[in-house]
């Protein structure tokens, strides 16, 4: 496969050189088999369109409405609640978490989980699972957070530890707020991209460049690399249309990097052809071709690590079902260590569509309300007033 791809790449370079000399439109089509293995997400990254007809006209004026201006305030309020309702972590893990050393914190918790499994200490294992869930929340790994919290909940329920069961229910409520925040940010970035493109169609490109850069950064923070690349391409097209070729080439290179490191060689090479059509030099073209190859190799290494993690996860499930908890957790630890070497672009190369993000956040609302009601009832039963207040505080933010 590597040899065939190298030969194809050499042929493609030759065609590009001819095109650069003649400035004729290339008819070369680059086809590449892209590995599509993944772990959690089920949908391809959303590919934004440049025109939405009447939809754009409806959205564009809405940017001046109070609800748009207050989005930042709403986000800040919810973030304050998320922080104020954080659970108390064990001292060492709390120290790591405060400093942002999540890798060290996760490694330590996985060691504790392995030890607890070996000692058949279900309580210690449940506490480690709960803390792993909190770390995943702080890192925005909401899928993993849901898995860890569900396991912690089940274990505490088996132990009959109602107070800690209530604590996990609170965590599940907080998980919804994270999902809701993510859905709002995703939707807002999408809206802003559409508004920007509408303004560009009216000849107002330089009025929205900062807004587009914000859209890029928001999507990068959310690991929505396809959406970020789409925004970069909008910048590339805008700068090119205004004859600002230096800025256009930089935006194009950034988009290509995101496409290639996410395994999307077809999009990377398509955009490179467009850059050549707008005057990219032969030297710069050759440099980008080399970068695409390097980025793609990084992606392939990550895909291999993801495959190893999946294999370890399967071994964990098999051994766990046989009752060999210690060996099972050793493989789960290896799975997490394998994932730690994976680039975020490869790990999150598939992301739900904007509407899917909003829909799932609505579905999770029901679970969150039920979980927080259960938490409040248990805390009331055991006279834990602080827990009752925390549950109610979270319920007020669910909508």
Image: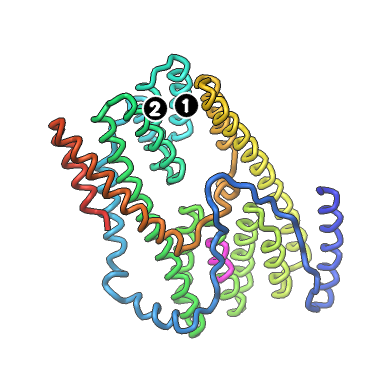
Please report contact status of discs 2 and 1: CB closer than 8 Å, yes or no. yes
Report x, y in % for residue 191.
Answer: 42, 70
Report x, y in % for residue 342.
Answer: 59, 41
| Crowding near the residue tagged with mark 1, few <14, some 14–19, many ≥20 C-alpha atoms within 10 Å | many
Report x, y in % for residue 95.
Answer: 36, 29
Magenta segment includes 280: no
Quadrant in the picture for residue 309: top right
Which residue corresponds to mark 2? 128
Could you tell me which residue is drawn at 24 percent across and 42 percent down? 84
Q: Please name whichever residue, 287 or 348, is drawn nearer the observer in this view of the structure.
A: 348
Magenta segment includes 231: yes
Left or right side of 321 for 306: right
- Magenta residue span: 227-234
Q: Is mark 2 on a helix, strand or loop?
A: helix
| Crowding near the residue tagged with mark 2, few <14, some 14–19, many ≥20 C-alpha atoms within 10 Å | many
Sequence-first tag of 2 and 1: 1
């Amino acid at each position: 496969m590597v040899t065939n791809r190298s030969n194809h790449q050499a042929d493609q370079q030759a065609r590009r050189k001819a095109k650069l000399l003649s400035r004729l439109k290339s008819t070369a089509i680059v086809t590449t088999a892209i590995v599509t293995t993944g772990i959690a997400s089920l949908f391809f990254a959303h590919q934004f369109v440049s025109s939405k007809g009447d939809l754009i006209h409806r959205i564009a004026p809405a940017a001046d409405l109070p609800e748009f201006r207050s989005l930042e305030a709403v986000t800040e309020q919810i973030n304050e609640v998320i922080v104020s309702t954080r659970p108390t972590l064990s001292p060492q893990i709390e120290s790591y978490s405060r400093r942002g050393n999540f890798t060290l914190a996760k490694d330590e918790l996985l060691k504790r989980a392995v030890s607890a499994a070996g000692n058949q200490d279900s309580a210690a294992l449940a506490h480690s699972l709960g803390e792993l869930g909190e770390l995943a929340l702080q890192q925005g790994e909401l899928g993993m957070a849901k898995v860890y919290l569900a396991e912690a909940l089940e274990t505490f329920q088996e132990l009959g530890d109602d107070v800690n069961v209530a604590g996990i229910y609170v965590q599940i409520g907080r998980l919804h707020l994270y999902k809701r925040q993510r859905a709002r940010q995703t939707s807002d970035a999408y809206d802003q991209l559409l508004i920007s493109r509408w303004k560009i169609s009216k000849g107002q490109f330089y009025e929205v460049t900062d807004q587009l850069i914000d859209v890029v950064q928001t999507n990068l923070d959310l690991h929505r690399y396809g959406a970020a690349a789409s925004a970069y391409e909008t910048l590339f097209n805008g700068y090119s249309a205004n004859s600002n070729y230096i800025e256009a080439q930089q935006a194009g290179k950034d988009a290509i990097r995101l496409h290639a490191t996410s395994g999307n060689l077809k999009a990377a090479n398509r955009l490179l052809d467009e850059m050549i059509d707008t005057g990219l030099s032969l030297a710069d073209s050759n440099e980008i071709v080399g970068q695409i190859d390097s980025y793609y190799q990084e992606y392939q290494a990550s895909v291999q690590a993801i495959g190893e993690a999946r294999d370890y996860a399967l071994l964990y499930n098999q051994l766990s079902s046989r009752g060999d908890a210690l060996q099972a957790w050793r493989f789960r630890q290896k799975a997490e260590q394998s994932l730690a070497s994976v680039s975020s672009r490869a790990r999150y190369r598939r992301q739900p569509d904007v509407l899917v993000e909003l829909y799932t956040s609505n579905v999770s609302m029901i679970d969150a309300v039920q979980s927080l009601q259960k938490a409040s009832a248990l805390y009331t039963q055991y006279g834990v007033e602080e827990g009752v207040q925390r549950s109610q505080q979270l319920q007020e933010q669910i909508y």
